[in-house]
Image (cartoon, rainbow, N blue to C red):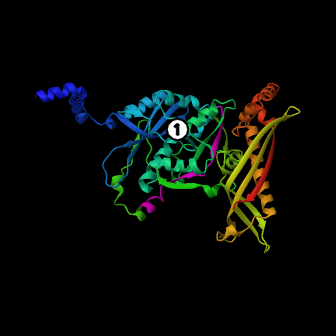
Amino acid sequence: MKKMIDAVKKYPFILILVLILVAFTPYSLFSPGQSRKRAVVIAIGLDKIEDEYEISFLTFIPSPNQEFQQANSVVSGKGSSVSEAVLDAQLTLGKDIGLSHAKTTVVNEKMLEEDVSSSLDYLMRVVSLPENTVFVCTNTTAKQLLMATNSLEKNLGIKLDQLVSYNANEVYISDTSLEAFYKGYYSPTKSSLIGYIEHIKDSTQSEQAAPQNQSSSQGSGDSQKSSQTSSSQDGQQGGAGSSEQNSSAGSSGQSENEKQRGSLQGQSQILNKGDAVLLRDGQKVALLDVDNLNSINLLSTKRSLDSITITDVETEDGKNVDMTFLVKNKVVSVKTDFQNNIPLFVANINLGVQLSEIDTKAQKVKQNVQNTQITEEIAQKLEQKIKAEFAKVLQILRENKADVLGVYDHFFAENRKEFLSFLSSLDHPEDFLSHVVFMLNLKVEQDG
């Protein structure tokens, strides 16, 4: 005993450690799990119907199962404000809301008819919605999309964040997080881009679905080639405080054929084509497709283009074919200047491309396309196609006074004094993009 007391005197931290273990071990062993007090939200949906807000949470429900699949539930709440809707959803759950794990935030297209930042402000300031969550828009209600993805995960094992992250890395060409949205929103140009996911409901359910907001896409082109489509069965929809649970453990006895037959009725599609919504002042002004986004990305030094397709190329044997090229590398040099008080935006762009596909109208040939040399005629066609697509998206941006090309930042950094004087001379400074002269010096070469 004396030796123990001497040891404690010599090493007093041992006594402190013992006291901590005695004090906190029983509490840790017998206290309820945190999941009983707080709901883990993995996706958020925000809708506004007339003057009422509806917020939907795709929540994770911890439950033992033998398939290593998580059980999810869609819980919603309504109110005259976002805070009231959140409180209503919390009362339905019987738990506090935790948004630190939320990977996706979805809003309905109609939410973008007004400044959407005012609706998101409460979620970010009070409920601590993370800024790195992916921010997307859908044509149906956000609640319907969350419910459809819940069924999708149950039937096919595909999660909403997987559908979104595919485009965030490969197709969107731009950062579509909440942080990027707010950076554009508070910038001098007040312009930003967010992702767009199309939810197509089955015709048998069209009467129950909310009226869809028809948006005019600026061109279709080859954007369908890079689309990602998934089908699911929508669950039944409830009102405020309704929930739909994904009971994945009970689906193990259902055969794949039965699933496919069951999906023929009440089927819906989640179509991810890589489109994006152009916002100004937090409101939707245009829907851009992949070709538009590729043109916007043409001036970016951080991201490469996806692919370029030219049509009616005459081969040596006299056939007309379509050729698709992958952009393997890109070098961009941008310079701004003023000549006779006219702002000039000069971009020198070198593209290294590689032929990936030849469409002979009858069949697509992918073998040995690397041996095909890019002739001067093909290079000219590629340059004409790129410049024509850039002119289209530039017209869209000018019409909507939205600068997502970084033109303002380049002029402000390189010619600040002249640029500020130029802006002050305009009747409408926000329309400065229409007065800028763009010069694209484009060179296309074969890579490798």
User: Measured along the vertical axis of the image, is residue 336 above or below residue 226?
Assistant: above
Q: Quadrant of the C terminus?
A: bottom right
Residue 203 is situated, as x and y percent measured from the top left of the image, at: 54, 53
Q: Residue furthest bottom?
A: 317
Give the camera-side residue of 190 and 437. 437
Look at 80% across and 48% down and name the residue there.
441
Residue 224 is situated, as x and y percent measured from the top left of the image, at: 63, 56
The magenta stretch spans which residues? 259-281
Q: Residues within 10 Å of mark 1 (few under 14, many from 20)?
A: some
Snapshot quadrant of residue 16: top left
Give the camera-side residue of 446 and 319. 446
Q: Is residue 261 magenta?
A: yes
Q: Amino acid at mark 1?
A: Asn
Residue 426 is situated, as x and y percent measured from the top left of the image, at: 81, 27
Residue 206 seen from this side: no
Q: Is residue 423 magenta?
A: no
Residue 165 is situated, as x and y percent measured from the top left of the image, at: 53, 48
Q: Is 16 left, or right, of 274 in this rendering?
A: left
User: Measured along the vertical axis of the image, is residue 332 above or below residue 377?
Assistant: above
User: Measured along the vertical axis of the image, is residue 305 above or below residue 75?
Assistant: below
Give the camera-side residue of 445 and 242. 445
Look at 53% across and 45% down and name the residue there.
209
Residue 415 seen from this side: yes
Q: Quadrant of the N terminus?
A: top left
Q: Is 331 left, or right, of 132 in this rendering?
A: right
Snapshot quadrant of residue 343: top right
**Residue under pointer 1:** 132
